[in-house]
Image (cartoon, rainbow, N blue to C red):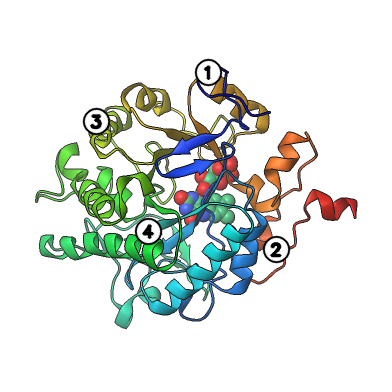
Amino acid sequence: MSQSPQTQTPDLFTPLQLGAIQLPNRIIMAPLTRSRAGEGNAPTPLNAEYYAQRASAGLIITEATQVCDTAQGYPNTPGIHTDAQTVGWRAVAEAVHAAGGRIVTQLWHTGRISHPLFQPNGALPMAPSAIAAQGQLYTGQGMEPFPTPRALETAEIPALVRHFADAAKRAVFDAGLDGVEIHGANGYLIDQFLRDGANHRTDQYGGNVENRARFLLEILEATTHAIGADRVGLRLSPTGGFNDMSDSDPLGHFTTIAKTLNSFNLAYLHVIEGLPGNAMAPAPGLPHVAAALRAVYKGAIILNGGYSHATADAALAKGEADAISFGEQFLANPDLPTRFARKAALNEPDRASYYGGGAKGYTDYPALESVAA
Ligand SMILES: Cc1cc2nc3c(=O)[nH]c(=O)nc-3n(C[C@H](O)[C@H](O)[C@H](O)COP(=O)(O)O)c2cc1C
């Protein structure tokens, strides 16, 4: 199955080097929030079992993980800013490595997608500008409207940048994870800075795209300095509307950003642009930007959003991406690469058990061997 990347058309089973990480296949597990962290938002043995079950992925990208105590926006999502959380992640990393896998953790700050219930001392969530997302969020005590966040003071921003770098150090040096993915997608804090629908700042972090990208670029500068660029990936969702996001020129703005990213030599750029019919597909009237990013960005690109085995292989063969990530299919199929290789049927995901709870809908999806047994 495996081929030499230089001479053969790549497919999902062609090995790939992403920065410092050597992948045996190009079937990436997309980050998936599951809201099953334990006491103090620390990963548990159940979380370790879940990730170890999925160790045959070319690379596991973990669920989004808080970089500091203001970064949370949902119940029971893990952090990586306390010692207990770091110990929990160490057990996750050990379990995945013992099962032969590779794992990076996705670092996030949810910004305005939060609620005083998740903030220290019940404070308002923070954001680039005091603009509420339209809609409601799940707090663990029912649905609540998104609150109007407070706009960050310019002087507060360096500490937030340091939180990302400190979390990256904890992830790699203390927990033994293989790297980090900076969550710049889906309407969370970094994306709130990037897109002009959420960023109305008048300081050096707002205005033109260069200014709106400054927060992201400072985070990349700090994290790559902390752990090495070859262990840092970045996720972007240029046209995503999730969390009430919008931008006046996604194609122009994100092409500019992608060109700037070239100087970082990141392990990879992970772009969400759903295929037609996928929840992450650009809304009608919005441009498709993935091909434009591919044209200007020199490093490895992972594409995501509604791919099947066949459409993923086609995208790799056409050179549209270097790897493809799978969300819901990996959630429901711990042995997704084996199932793809054997062209076996896939388990259907159970949406009712996506967020919160225990083993049900989490570690009890059968692998083929246990189906056969
Ligand atoms: C239950 C669930 C949780 C998710 N959590 C995250 C997350 O923590 N971070 C993130 O960047 N994307 C998250 N996503 C988006 C997925 O990574 C992915 O972009 C999406 O599912 C589309 O890919 P797919 O069609 O292969 O599932 C989540 C999606 C689902 C269904």
Q: What residue do we see at 65% from left, 33% from top?
A: 308
If you read the primary sequence from the N terminus, does the residue marked by circle 3 or circle 4 appear first? 4
Q: Amino acid at mark 2?
A: Thr
Q: Position of residue 147 (x, y in %)?
A: 34, 66
Q: CA distance from mark 3 to mark 4?
A: 23 Å
Query: In the image shown, does 48 or 290 lie closer to the viewer?
Result: 48
Q: Nearer the viewer, mark 4 or mark 1?
A: 1
Q: CA distance from mark 1 to mark 2?
A: 35 Å
For residue 26, side relative to residue 230 (left or right): right
Q: Amino acid at mark 4?
A: Trp
Give the mark count: 4
Query: Which residue is under mark 2?
Result: 363
Mark 4 crowdedness (10 Å alpha carbons): few <14, some 14-19, many ≥20: many
If you read the primary sequence from the N terminus, does the residue marked by circle 4 or circle 1 appear first? 4
Query: Which residue is under mark 4?
Result: 108
Q: CA distance from mark 2 to mark 4?
A: 24 Å
For residue 354, side relative to residue 181 (left or right): right
Q: CA distance from mark 4 to mark 1?
A: 32 Å
Please tell me whether residue 217 is drawn above or below residue 155 in the rendered image: above
Residue 2 appearing in the image: yes
Q: Secondary structure at mark 1?
A: loop
If you read the primary sequence from the N terminus, does the residue marked by circle 2 or circle 4 appear first? 4
- For label 3, being within 8 Å of ligand 1 is answered no
Mark 2 crowdedness (10 Å alpha carbons): few <14, some 14-19, many ≥20: many
Query: Which residue is under mark 3?
Result: 256
Q: Position of residue 244 (x, y in %)?
A: 39, 49
Q: What residue do we see at 54% from left, 70% from top?
A: 91
Query: Which residue is under mark 1?
Result: 318
User: Which of the 4 image quadrants contains residue 324?
Assistant: top right
Q: Quadrant of the N terminus?
A: top right
Q: Amino acid at mark 1?
A: Lys
